[in-house]
């Protein structure tokens, strides 16, 4: 006798927002370092080697209070994303590209002192007029949209979205808090 087994897998929900405006995207790729990581089972030892593939870049000095705890951005042991070196490179680039990153999470504290300068604003929307000025289907979505509450108040009720937004875009070198990957 053959027994038929069916497996049901839940697929994650994905929110997609479309607009009639077409973004212009310019991509520039520069290899600064090559990192090779090997893992040997069944032990828990991880060995990493870093090989410089270009000139050693200068670093920028970072004044943020907790930057020393952000080992993923910069660590003396070399297991990091080399953020200060990347920022130094970007600061010498005469044509920086602005990138918008959407955080789909619990919201964001829009008045956070380490975030407010870097948060996207929908300039095609007139705040408080009760009209969908940009025609995207969302009324007065100046600071974004709360899909859970179905309103234009993306305030973070749990803190997680603000935390994620900070990892991405907290203002760097303002002598407070943390530095975001984008340096801001």
Image: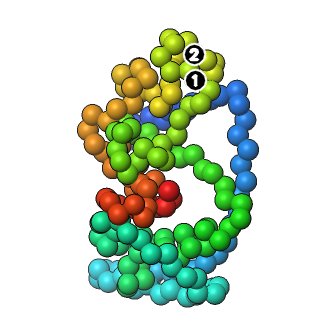
Crowding at dot 1, Cα within 10 Å, few <14 / some 14-19 / many 20+, comes out as many
Residue 37: image location, x then y, percent: 46, 80
Q: Residue 63 carries which label?
A: none
Residue 125 vs 26, above or below: the answer is: above
Residue 79 placement, left or right of 157: right
Residue 182 placement, left or right of 23: left
What count of labels does the image hold?
2
Distance between the Cα atoms at labels 1 and 2? 7 Å
Per the image, label 2 sits on a secondary structure element best described as loop
- The residue nearer to you, when weighing 15 against 81, is 81
Q: Can residue 133 be seen in this view?
A: yes
Looking at this view, name the residue that lies furthest to the top.
130
Residue topped by disc 1:
125
Q: In percent of the image, x 62 and y 26: which residue is there?
A: 124
Residue topped by disc 2:
132
Residue 174: image location, x then y, percent: 39, 60
Where's the N terminus, which quadrant? top left
Q: In percent of the image, x 61 and y 73: which residue is there?
A: 89
Q: Earlier in the sequence, mark 1 or mark 2?
A: 1
Instruction: Identify the image's colour scheme: rainbow, by chain, secondary structure or one colour.
Output: rainbow
Q: In percent of the image, x 58 and y 23: which residue is there?
A: 125
Per the image, label 1 sits on a secondary structure element best described as loop
Q: In percent of the image, x 41 and y 20: which residue is there?
A: 150
> Circles 1 and 2: CB distance less than 8 Å?
yes
Q: Can residue 7 be seen in this view?
A: no
Residue 172: image location, x then y, percent: 43, 61
Residue 91: image location, x then y, percent: 60, 68
Numbered disc in front, either 1 or 2: 1
Quarter-of-image position of residue 55: bottom right
């Amino acid at each position: 006798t053959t027994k038929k087994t069916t497996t049901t897998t839940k697929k994650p929900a994905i929110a997609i927002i479309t607009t009639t405006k077409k973004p212009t995207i310019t991509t520039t790729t520069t290899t600064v370092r090559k990192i090779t990581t090997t893992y040997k089972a069944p032990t828990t030892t991880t060995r990493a080697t870093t090989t410089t593939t270009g000139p050693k870049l200068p670093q920028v000095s970072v004044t943020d209070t907790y930057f020393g705890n952000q080992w993923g951005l910069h660590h003396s042991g070399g297991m990091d994303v080399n953020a200060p070196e990347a920022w130094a490179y970007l600061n010498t680039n005469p044509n920086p590209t602005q990138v918008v990153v959407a955080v789909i999470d619990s919201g964001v504290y829009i008045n956070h002192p380490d975030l407010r300068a870097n948060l996207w604003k929908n300039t095609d929307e007139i705040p408080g007029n009760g009209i969908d000025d940009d025609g995207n289907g969302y009324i007065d979505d100046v600071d974004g949209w709360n899909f859970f509450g179905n309103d234009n108040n993306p305030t973070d009720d749990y803190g997680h979205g603000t935390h994620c937004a900070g990892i991405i875009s907290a203002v760097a070198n303002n002598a407070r808090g943390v530095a975001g990957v984008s340096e801001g």
